[in-house]
Structure formats: C-alpha cells, structure tokens
Amino acid sequence: MIFIREKVIKRLRVFSFICGVFFCILFARVIYMQLIHGNYYLSQSDENRLRQTKIFAARGMIYDSKGRELVNNYPGYAIALQRRKSYSDDLLERLSRVVGLSVEMIKARIQQNKDSYEPIILRTHITPQMLTKFEEERKNLSNVLLMVYPERKYIYNNFGVHTIGYVGEVSEYEIENKLYNDVTVGSIVGKSGLEKYYDKVLRGVDGYTLEEVDVTGSVVRNYDNVRPEPGKSLHLTIDYEMQKKLENFTKRHLENLRRTKKAPNAYAAAVVALDPRSGAIRALLSVPDYNPNFFVEGMTEKQWNTINTDPNLPQLNRVIAGEYPPGSTFKIVTGSAAFEQKKVTLDELIYDGGFHPLVPTMRNAGGEVLGWLNFIRGLAMSDNVYFYELANRVGIDIISKYARIYGFGKLTGIDLPDESKGLVASKEVKRKIWNEGWRLGDTFNAAIGQGFNLSTPLQLAVMLSSVANGGIHYQPYLVENITNPDGTVFQIPKRTEAKHIDVSQTTLNYMQQGMSATTREGGTAAYFRTLPKPIAGKTGTAENSHGRDHGLFVAYGPVDNPELCVVAIVEQGGYGSVSAGPIVYHIFEEYFRERGWLPKHKSLKA
Amino acid sequence: MNKKFFCFDNPKNAVLVCFGLLLAVGCVNVYSASFVYATSEMDNSYHFVARYIMFALASIWAFWVMRKIGYKFFLQQNVLLCFGGAIFLLLGCVLVFGPEINAAKRWLDFGFFHLQPSEFAKLFIVLLSSSMLGKHLLAGRRANVFHAPAGYCILWSIVFAALVFVQPDMGTAGIIFGLPALLCLLAGVRRSQIVLAGIVVLGIAVTFIWHASYRFNRVLMWLDPWQDPTGNGYQMVQSFIAIGSGGYFGTDWGAGTAKLFFLPELHTDFAFAIFCQENGFVGATLIIALFVLLGFALWTIAKRTTDPTGFLLVSGIIFLVVGQAVANMAMVCGLLPIIGVPLSFISYGGSSMFASSLGLGLVLSVYDNECKMEKEQAETAKMEQQSPIERRRSWQIIKGNKR
C-alpha cells in the first residue's frame, strides 16, 4: 500500500484546526449573546410577549348635600395601539381612517408614549360609527386594542358647571410642567372646578393586567392583575334643588331684564349663597354657563365656538374670579372703620346737600338731596355724601385696613382653583397703577366702593357672613366630606379655623341695624318686607366703564338668627335693587319655603 | 486503534455516548419546542416528539445494521450505482410528485412520514467520493479532479446538487456540491486546482445570490438583521432574542417564549435557539461540547484509519454530521446567513437523522474493520516470531475460536 498517509493526515489536521477555530468563534458568540448581552435580549423577549394593559380607575362620584348623584361614570370605548418597535404604514393608514386622526398625529402620539410599556391610547370616546368601522377593519388591525374605560358623565349637563368643572385628557404642556402627579399621556384629569381642585382624590389609581401573549396577540397566560382603585367621592354643600331653582330663576330673570329693556345687556350674573354659621356654600351660580360633557365627548367646532368666542366668557367662574367694584355694599366697611375709630356715633346727624363741600363735584347717585341723616338712614338710603364725610374723617389708610380685615384683597381660600384676589384701594395701589398721588376724591370714591376697589362676589359674601354672624370669619367651602367608594368617610377637607375679626360687637350691631333698615319701608329694597322673616340687605351699583353699571345686592336672613348670606351681581344690570335684588329675594323665598316658614307652591311676588 | 480516548476506553465508545446523548437531548428539545405548535395545529402535543422517537429508534436500528454490513459493501461500484440510481430517481420524483411546502418541493409524501431524498444524497455523495478518491490514494497518487475516478464524483455531485437546487434548496445543494470538494482537498488535490475551484465556486455563488432577490436579502439580513426586525430580519432577530434571553441558566423548563409562534421552524432549523433559551449558557455549552467531542472522536478514528477509502469516508461523515451542526449553530447565532441546514440529531427531521445515523454506523464499521486488521497484523507479527509448531498451534487456536 503506497497510501501517502502523512500528507493526507496533514490536510485533515488543517481542516480540524479550521473546524476548531470555528467552534471557538461559535462559543465566543454564544458567550457574547447570552452572558454579555443577555439582559438586553431578555428585555426584548419580555417586550415581545408581555403585554401590560391599563385598567382605568373610575373617578370618584360627586353628590349634592342630599346625596343626589351629580357626576358619575359610564363605560366608554377607547382605541389603543399595542406597543411595538415599529408599525407598518398600512396599519397606520387604516387606523387613521378608523379613528379620524391623521397618520402624523398618530405617529406623534406614538412618539410621546415611547417610554412606556402600556398600549398607546389613540382616541377616547369612540362613537358607534367609529366602532362599526373598527369592527369592519378588525382583521387588518393587528396590535390595535379596543379598551373600555369609565367615561365621565355630568348628569345634569350645565348644572353647577362652574363649581363642578370638567375633566379632559392631560395636555403635553401640563405633563411637561408637572401640573399633575402621576399622569401619563392619555390620563384623564380634572381641568377646572372641583374636578381640578380635588383631582388627586377623585382620580383613583389605575390598575393593570400583565399578560403573556403569543405572536398574534392572543393571551397565553395571565401573570399579574392589579385591580384599579376607584377615586373617592365628593359630597357637596350645595343642594341640587335649590341650585337648580336658582339657575332657572336667574336665567329667566336676566331674560326678563333684557326683554323689558330695563337692562338690555344683562347677559351675565353671579350669585353665591353661603351659610354664615359655617361658611358652607349653599349655591354658587355663574351665568352664562356651558355643558361640560362637550369637553368629555370631544366637541364639534360649533360647540367650541359657542364656548370660546362668546364675549360673555361662559368659562369664567364669576363668583370667585369675577372682579367687580363692590359699590355701595362697601359702605359697610367704611361705616365699620368710622365706628371702630370712634369718628362718628350712631345718632350723629350729617347733612347731605347733594354734594360734599370739600369735593363738590361728587354727588349722590341720581342727584338726590336727602338732608340730615344718621348712620342707619344713611346706609338704608345708601347715601353717598354721608359716607364721603365718614371717609373724610377716618382717611383712606384706615378704610383699607378694615377692608382687609373683612377679607378684601386676599383669597377667601374656597376649594376651587383659579380664585382672584381682588384689589383694595390704597395710596400704594394708585401709585403703582397710575403713578399719581392720592387725593381726597379718591378716598371718597373708595368709601363707596368705586375707584380702585375690586372684589369678587365671594369676598362680599364672606364679609357679609362676618357681619351676620357677629364677627366670625369662616373659610367658605364646597365639599362637606370625601367618602370612600364603600361610603365611609375618607377625609374631611382641611379648612382654616374660624376666627374673630377685629371689629367690635357694637359696630357690627350697627351694621346689622343699617342693613335691616334697607329692606324696610324707606330703604332701597323695601320689597323684601313681604318675606315672612326679616332680611338684612344692601344694594350696590358698581360703575362700569364699558356699559351700564353692574347691579349688586347682598343680603342675609333671618335677621335675628342668620342662616343664609346671599350675594348677587348682574352685569350691566343697572340698579342693584332692580337687577340683583329679585334674585336674592327668590333664594330667600325658596329657602324659607324649604324651612317651612312659607307655604309651598305659593309665590309671594308676581 | 484500540487506544484510550480521553476517559473512554476507545473512540468508538465516545461516539456511542455522544450519539445517545444527542438523541436524548434532541428528544426533549423537540418536545419542548413543538408542543405549542403541535397542540394548536395537530391537536396533539406529542405529535412531533412521538415521530421523533420513532425515527430515533429506526435510526439506531439502521446504525446497527450499517455497522454489521460494513462499509466495504457500499463502496463496491455496482452497489454504488444502484444507490445512486435510486437517489437520482427519488430526487426526480420529488420534483414531479412532491407536495409543495413553504413554496418548495423537498419531500416525498409516504403517508405517515415525509422522505427528504436530498439528505440521503448527502450521504451517498460522501460514499461515492471516498470510493472514487480512495482509488487515487490507493494508487499512491494525488487526487485530480480532471481525471477519471475523482472527476466522476464531482460530476455526480453536480448532477445531484442541480436536482436539489431546483427544489429549491440552495443550502443542501451547496452541501452536496461541497462535500466531495472538501474530500478532494483532503485527498491531495493540487493547489492550482484548489484556487481554480475556489474562484469557480465563488463566482457561481455570487451569481446565484444576485439572481434571486430573496437570497440576496438573506445575505443582507445576515449582515444587519436589525434594519428590518419585523420583515426580512424577523427570523434572525427573534433567534437572537431567544438565544440571548437564555442568560446563564435559561428560563424555567419548557418556559421558552420563542415557541409561542415568535420563531418559526423552531423544532427544525432553529432548534438550537429554543434550546439556548430554555437551558441558557449551560445548555449551549453542553451541545457545543457534545459536538466537539463527537468530532474529535471521529477525527481520532479517521487519523488512526489506514485504509484510504475508510479514512475518506470517516472524514466525509465528520463534515456531514459535525460540519452541518456547526453550520447550523453558526447560522442561528447570526455568524452565517440563514441556509436550511439541520442541527444533526437535535433538529426534528427523520431523513436527516436517519442519514446521519447511517453515516455514524459506517464510521463504526470502518473502526471495526481497522480493529480487525490491527488484530490480524498483530497476530501475524506474533506468529512470525513463533516457531513453526507454535504457529500452527496458534492457527488452530484461532480456528478453534472461530468454530
């Protein structure tokens, strides 16, 4: 055998060497993939097969003071996109046709959500039409989910919208600026009113399911379920019946004012009623209003325009954010200042010659001349000259001080967002705004609540309640308590402690007497006599440079044991007794009827 | 020949152990990889593993039969012709009668199993090449691809490769063409011919790859599968994810996720991926070690074989069994483009396993033959040292033993 063995075996060695090198490379590759990059591939594998689906927590309910549901939830549909590394253009196009969003918007949406494991919610509030389209296309829409979520429902539409507010999807701006805690794109948050103020308690905690899915997205195994924790419910101090009657009456009344040409531009009004014994708000109304369900359901352009381009600003809550000159209602502050400083006595008569001698240009409203007046009559007749004289005696600094004591110029602390502070007239304010020195005329103006003074209706109500209850300052509030879903009390919202304001009992007594006289024969609102219990009130007319004066009326009653303070403002309503007075009258009428002091179904005033 | 091999008494034992372990691992892995698919498609989670076990038993039987028959029987020219003709016919039948699966005709439907003749073609071409090239070596000459005996095997391989290529199955065609080429290299083809062959092969490969876009895509995807993870690179990426996510010790038993239809061909070509996912680095090391051991044992047998045809046969089987396994693992790991090469014994596939077992049987028959020759030589050498009387006595002893 001449088999050239050595040579062949040499070649076999070369082969086996190459083979060995190959094995080494393979081994190195396995080490690289499994040991060095193992975690990366593991996360990829999890992303492949694990699907986390959010279960939306139902927002808490909102009830009125008698337990009637004002806001609840009902099941709505949302279309969401399963998380994937990339999506085919075809899918996005079909999807855009189904949900009515452009492909670019969908892509932007995906981009916004790139850091989460959860499905990307493309559109909430899916209409039945969209649902039909979705079902038709379902075969071609792999990785698209139909999710059920609790959708907010404002049962009585416009009812109490400025109090309750509305919810909406959190915006990019709000996420970036961290205006809400624990939100992701697509989260539903309160956007205004109580929904916003109590968003944290109302929202609840979303749950999720973690499922293992196969390549087509069908569930193989359920790993983990975290049940959602529903939000807490709010119980309001507002009574539905009373608020509803007030709303109806006010709208009707404004229409009457316009029709009878008493106030042709009276489109807006603000009314607030609170309990002077606690600060609980019984009614809060701002007209015009809007339907919060539009915000939840996604509104048409027409709806959007009616809400956003209305010159009467339906979204403005006039009770807490409308700043008006308090007008003659401010005379209570001026009067208190004068009595506290002992610059006047109850029986001292001051002569009204139609103008004040020091600033002769400043006259009474309507140019009346009322002659000699004491305080009670001065307040009841709302005589300007009398209060010019008081202001002349105490000076602007003291008036500002008492305005602040009564709560003007600062937030009342009500549990609503976006409250305004108002403004208290003072020398500094004038310097700041006009850069001019203070003059006596400015003091006179301030004394009767015009000029630089600005206050919200709620501030007036707080002042009024302090007068009515004998000098106790309560923080106004809307939410009586917060309950768990099972009905037990979760929390009573924190309120600042009631405190005595720095005004003596006698002074307050004088104010009460003056206000009581207003509603008696000879006062500016004598028609309140017809009510079964005496009411103390004060009219006001706030100067408005843009049109007719705003009409104000503040009142509390019954006089001997006050249970309700009401402030009403009718924008461009003219005299307060004509425009705002009837609204206040109506509230008391309804209130007394409810208390049993008035027979039911009988109106006192035609 | 009969010397110690590592901790084994001889390389034959090592081969047997590897063979058995690979079948066992394959059995478990086929079940784990296929039960989800089998449950959803066949309504019987044991569908594939039952068949695997059946094929494995048949393979062991064939292995034993081959060992008994001995390789020399198959190297006779008329026997080779017979088998060659049969395989040629079967390959032809595949093209005519074969059912189309995944846009390719590779199988013949025999009711309860599918026969893949191209797997047997691989084995046949190894037999043919070692027979033909062995003649060169026996004559003490280098193999020459342009001369009669060696040229034949190249021609045959081209014919078979062409038949397989049109199925289409480029990977197997490449192997059928490549095996005799490798054996030629081993049998001492001149360098000039090697270079020439290299250029020709490269040219053909490039032409074919350019010619069909899906092949070109496969090459592109091999270079960077992440550029299209949901399209062309999908299989590759999913394979990486499966292997990589195994980590050190893998997932729980049978909890690999690739089987949830993420990775197609899991129980066949991508068996290594799911095995790595479920058994982690430890499992991957075990498989690689088993093949290294098997290769080394076979290599040792080849090295110790004095019969040139036997030597070439064993080398060819090394390329067939171990070479394919390496190629498969490299492909699954992304070191080679995806070509349809099974992982010997681990992948589900009766024909492949059967052919590989036949191959191993032939190797052991070579081994047995060498042992016998060695023993005879030793006997003769011993007898030459003995006195004539003793020699006769020992003959009688041998004869007596034989009786």
Image (tube, coloured by chain):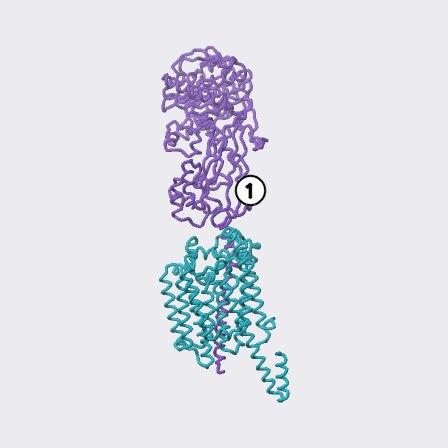
Tell me which corner region of the image, top left, top right, bottom left or bottom right, holds residue B166: bottom left
Among the chains, which one is purple?
A: A
Q: Position of residue B98 (x, y in %)?
A: 43, 60
In front of the other: B72 or A209 = B72
Figure quadrant of the C terminus of chain B = bottom right
Q: Position of residue A107 (x, y in %)?
A: 40, 45
Colour applied to chain B: cyan
In front of the other: B72 or A222 = B72
Q: Position of residue B266 (x, y in %)?
A: 49, 57
In front of the other: B209 or A48 = B209
Q: Which residue is mark 1?
A: A226
A204 up-or-down from A114: above or below: above
Figure quadrant of the N terminus of chain B = bottom right
Mark 1: give few (<14), some (14-19) or many (20+) Cα within 10 Å. few
A106 up-or-down from A26: above or below: above
Evaluate whether residue B243 shows in this view.
no
Outermost residue, front side: B403
Evaluate whether residue B359 shows in this view.
yes
Q: Position of residue A157 (x, y in %)?
A: 45, 28
Instruction: Say what secondary structure mark 1 lies in.
Output: strand
The amino acid type, in three-letter code, at marker 1 is Val
